[in-house]
Image (cartoon, rainbow, N blue to C red):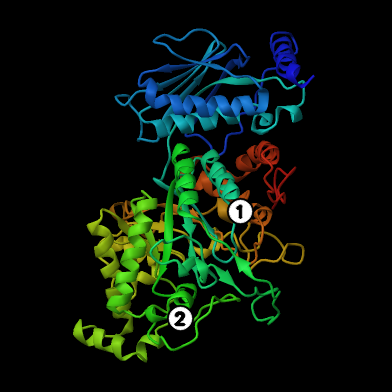
Amino acid sequence: MQSLLPFLFCFIFLVVSQTGFAQRVDSTSIIPQPAQLELKEGAFNLTPSSKILLRNSADSLRPLADYLNNQIASATWADLAIVKETTARDSAIVLTLNPEGHFKNDEAYHLSVTPQKIEIAAPTTAGVFYGIQSLLQLLPPEIFYDDPTRVPQNTVWNIPAVEITDYPRYEYRGLHLDVARHFFSVSFIKQYIDLLAMHKMNRFHWHLTEDQGWRIQIKQYPKLTEIGAWRDSTLVGHYGTDRYDGERYGGYYTQEEIREVVQYAKKRHVTIIPEIEIPGHSSAALAAYPELSCNPDKQYHVQTTWGIFEDIYCPSETTFTFLENVLTEVMKLFPSQYIHIGGDEAPKDAWKNSQLAQRVIEREGLENEEELQSYFITRIEKFLNKHGRQIIGWDEILEGGLAPNATVMSWRGEKGGIKAAKQGHNVVMTPGSPLYFDYYQADAETEPLAIGWLNTLKETYSYEPTPDELTKEESRYILGAQGNVWTEYMKSGNKVEYMAYPRASALSEVVWSPKEKRNWDGFLQRLQTHFQRLEFMGVNAAEHYRNEITNE
C-alpha cells in the first residue's frame, strides 16, 4: 500500500487542482513584508506536471531549483522536473539570473505569478533564494510540513497571482545563539538556520566559547574540549539561588560537524559569524590552560553558574600565540569576513595585580588597563586583518580606544553604536531592550523561567535600528540589527524556539522591510498565517498573539 501512496496523492492533486474545488487564495501573508506587492486576478495551479525552468546561468541556479523542489516534495510528494529552457512554457516556475537588471541591491528580486507561470528574477543567487522564500509563503501553510502523510488531502496548491518587487533595507540581518551556557545538537542548529533563511535573515552569530563551556574543537589544543567543554554542575533557578543539579554537563562541535553546518548555511545564504571570547569570559579556556592567565598557580574551573568572573587572559606572548593559533583554525572553518572576538564584561583586577600586565602598559605607553584592553584587541585585529578578516565585538571594545577597523555590536543600549558610527565605524544594533530574546515576553508570573526584564513582541516590532540623532552620512554606518538568544535558562531547543519566535519574525521585518511599510496591525494579521507555518515546521513558537488582531 505504501508504494501506491505517491501515485494516489498525484491523482488527488490533479483532480482537486483541476476541478471547481480549486479556490482562489487571497492571502499574501508574507513575513517579512515585501517592499512592493500587487495582487492580481487568478492563481497559479501547482501540479505534479509543473516544471522548474532554469533560464540563464543554469548551473548556478540548479542548487536553488533542487532546494525549491525538495521543499515542495517534502509536503506534496510531487517531484517536479527541472529543465534548462530559454523560453517558459505553461505551468512553469522560471528561475532567472539577471545581473544587468534594474534591482535595488544584490539581494533584491522580482517575483511574478500569473495563472500560466511563475518567474523569479534577481541579480544574484541570494536574490533568487529570497524570491523562493516569498513563493513558498504564498502557498498554503501546509507546504512547510516535512511529511506528506500529515498534509490534509483537500489541500489546494494554488498560488495567488501577484507582482512583487522586493529588497532588504539593511545588509546585516542577524540572529545569535549562545551554545556555551547550554549546548545544542547539529540537527537543531540546522533547524535554527532554516528559520533564519525562511525570514530572509543572512547572519548567524554562533557564540562558541564562554566561562561555562568551550564548544569548538581546536586540534592544536585538545584540552579545550577535553576539559573546557565540561562543567561539573549547573545552577538551578535564578542567579544567587546557590542550588545546583550536580550533573556533569557539556559537549562540543567537531571540526567536521562545523564544516557540515557552514556548508548547510551557505546553501541557504546564511553567513555564520563565530565568536571566540577575549579577553574575558575565558574561564573554560583557563581551566584547560592556566598558563594563559596572569596567575597560573590558581585553580581555574569551568563555571557552574552565570555572571561575570575575574578570569581573564593575561596579555603575554604565550597568550597571543595561543589565540593566533586558535583563530587560524577558526578561519579555516569559517569563511565569514567577520570573526567576533567578544570584548565584553572583562574585569581588570587580574591585570592590575599582574607585574607582566603592568610592564606591557609601561612598555606600550598606555594610560591604564582600559587602554591595555584596546591594545589587546588591536593586536588580534591586526592578526585577523593580515589574513583578510575583520573583527566585530561588543560595545566594550570602545573602551580605551577602538581598534582601527573594528565593527561594533551595540548591546548596552544604542549609545556605543552611536559613538562608533560618529567615529566612522560600522555598527550592528543589538540593544538589550528590545532585542534580547532571553528576556521575558509576557508577565513573568505566567512565563517559563527567563533571565528577567521584559521585551514584548510589539516592542521588538517597533524597534528602529537607525537612531534619529545620526546624520545621513553617519547613518550609513548602521549595517543592520541582530536579535540575541542567551541560554542561561534555555536547556532545550524547544525553549530556544519559544523565546526566539515570533520575536525573531518581528525583527526580520524590521531589518528587511521599508520603514514606511511597517504596520503593527498588518503584521499581527499576517502573523496568524505565519503561526500555522511555524506549527507545521514543528517550531515551538510562543502563541501570546495567536488568534488576536490587536493586543493593546
Where does the image place residue 234, in percent across and percent down from the top left? Answer: 65, 73
The residue drawn where x is 68% and y is 72% is 247
State the image quarter where residue 427 is shown: bottom left
Where does the image place residue 416, in percent across and percent down from the top left? Answer: 39, 67
Total of numbered circles in the picture? 2
Where does the image place residue 236, in percent across and percent down from the top left? Answer: 70, 74
Where does the image place residue 381, in percent across and percent down from the top left? Answer: 28, 64
Looking at the image, is 146 positioned above or below residue 387?
A: above
Looking at the image, is 352 positioned above or below residue 287?
A: below
Determine whether the residue tagged by mark 1 lies in a helix, strand or loop.
helix
The residue drawn where x is 73% and y is 8% is 19
Question: Comparing marks 2 and 1, which lies closer to the viewer?
Answer: 2
Report the amino acid beneath label 2.
Asp
| Between 112 and 489, the one nearer to me in the picture | 489
Q: Residues within 10 Å of mark 1 (few under 14, many from 20)?
A: many
Please indicate whether residue 373 sits to the left or right of residue 221 in the image: left
As drawn, the residue found furthest toward the right would be 1
| Between 307 and 512, the one nearer to me in the picture | 307
Looking at the image, is 41 positioned above or below residue 401?
A: above
In the rendered image, which residue does mark 2 sit on?
A: 311
| Residue 170 visible to an observer of this rendering | yes
The residue drawn where x is 65% and y is 66% is 489
State the image quarter where residue 162 is shown: top right
Report the amino acid beneath label 1.
Ala
The residue drawn where x is 69% and y is 77% is 244
Please indicate whether residue 415 sits to the left or right of residue 158 in the image: left
| Residue 400 visible to an observer of this rendering | no
Q: Residues within 10 Å of mark 2 (few under 14, many from 20)?
A: many
Look at the image and tell me in which quarter the N terminus lies. Answer: top right
Determine whether the residue tagged by mark 2 lies in a helix, strand or loop.
loop
In the rendered image, which residue does mark 1 sit on?
A: 500
Please indicate whether residue 261 sits to the left or right of residue 446 in the image: left
